[in-house]
Image (tube, rainbow, N blue to C red):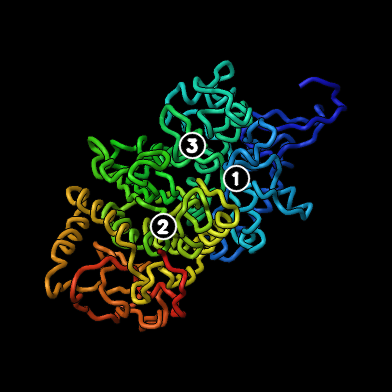
Amino acid sequence: MKGRTSEWYQVHFEGWGSEYDEWIRLADLHPRTEKSVFGPLGPESELKWRRIQLYNKEAPEDLRRTGLVYDPCTLRHACTCIDHEANHPETACAFSFLSSLASAEPPSQSSRVASVLQIMEDSELLDRVVGVRGCEAVKAEVSAVHSSSHVESFGGKKYGGAEKQPKDLRRMQCGGSGLATDTVFNGEDTSLASRVAAGCVVSLMFAVVKNVVTNGFAVVRPPGHHAERNKAMGFCVFNNVSVAVRAAQRRLAVKRVLIVDWDVHHGNGTQSIFYDDSSVLFISIHRHDNGTFYPFSGAVGEFGEKAGKGYSVNIPWSDVESAPPGNTEYLAAFHHIVLPIAREFGPELVFVSAGFDAAEGDAIGGCRVTPEGFAHMTALLLSLAGGRVILCLEGGYHNSSLSAGAAACLRVLLGQSPPPLSRDSGHGKAHDYNKPHEKSVSAFHKVIRTHIRYWKCMKNLNDLVANRNKACLKQPQPNNSDPYTNNSSEIGFISNRIDDDCEDGKNNSNSKYNSSNNNKNKDIDSKFEFRVPPCLYEQATFTTNFRQ
């Protein structure tokens, strides 16, 4: 930096978000040492965070449970083409959400991050979260999951890659530079955004593991779950969740970590990074269409290798156009497969690759999950790992669906009960509102048969399914009827009747979220069927928006 000491300069400190940029004179600049914790203006730069910390200490306990991390540096990542907002679904205009609040102007329709934060602000949710300071991930953290060539090629000058460019960099059809046809690479802007995105998730992980907050939401971009060890793809540069998982294991001695990926696209990058690792359980629910849907991976037969056999669990949807999965299908997968395996694994920490492109209204995903569905999935995961759950934003390209789903999840993290589900299962039969589509059930059978060798709960469930034609199959119901706090059931919710346990959406304790030991064991007659607990649905008139 050159100039007279009386002139003013805008200074950005590496590792700090752009909202901490300062206009200063050279004469006032404080040098930063390795032991210094201050910004460009010394102690004055800490005033904002001291005010936040003071508020957090004085706030009631229920307002200090959820951390949220976001850094406007990530908005710098955008294509250099003339109309990048129209050409790239995973984009954010060069505009700070914070400035939009100050000017009272609505965010751009194409700014995914801004739309998420805007609805959180409008819903007064941001006032209830704990602001977690993000920073750039250090090179060693990213190198724990990516090759050195990948780290230096995409990390920019900060990671020693000033002279390097991604080997597959090319001019895309839109006119900008990127990888393949979809993944934007805009030089140092993309490198900075990628370092900050990974670092934000790491910062939130530290806050959760060290009990500064109970759970949290990382609103970051670019997303990460497609990024493999030596490959950027699918809008992803660094695998944000994987970087944080390895940091938790190596720096905080966390032994077992669960990653649930509900993005509509398979998390091929996350799976490949932990494919031979038994300390990380990866469960993905995604659209597959028999291998024809991007990224063309995630078949049931991809279950891990070596020590990691059985620790990659894929639940793939096929024929989505004719049978789009919605709340019932996703929650059936959670109750019968995801939660039983997760409880048997016993994670100490849970990450969610929270893409919202499976939401109703998202044309890319073609699924029908509503904000209420995402809320219930979040609530179910909070029953694991003592509630230490971190959601990390991945995909989602219909702004209203994306923002509504993210806000619904944040409400649950903050302690609100998820709202009841609609009975519209799309089947045309009122009594089947909590029964998943037969094509989804077929996927469940494949998953169960594949994993009976690795998980006791899947073997037990397979035995039940195998006996489905018996006249009477007796299986005691769990004592605890609460689907969010029940840790005793190995095989999830099993029912063949719509009136079990939860008449009128209530149990004897008058709340489906309150533990109860009042339910008696009941027989399951006729045959085994995959069902979602009826108490999760509203007792309203059944709609007629049926699936053809």
Q: CA distance from mark 2 to mark 1?
A: 39 Å
Quick check: 497 left or right of 71? left
Label of residue 133 in the image: 1
The percent coordinates of residue 411 (x first, y second) are 54, 63
Q: Amino acid at mark 1?
A: Arg
Quick check: 374 left or right of 332? right
Q: Nearer the viewer, mark 3 or mark 2?
A: 2
- Determine the residue located farthest toward the top in the rendered image: 163
Label of residue 234 in the image: 3
Q: Amino acid at mark 3?
A: Gly
User: Which image quadrant: the N terminus?
Assistant: top right
The percent coordinates of residue 315 (x first, y second) are 32, 51
Q: Residue at x 39, y 49 (%)?
A: 286
For marks 2 and 1, the one nearer the N-term is 1
Q: Nearer the viewer, residue 308 or 205?
A: 308
Quick check: 301 left or right of 220? left
The image quarter containing residue 306 is top left
- Determine the residue located farthest toward the right in the rendered image: 6
The percent coordinates of residue 200 (x first, y second) are 55, 42
CB under 8 Å between callouts 3 and 2?
no
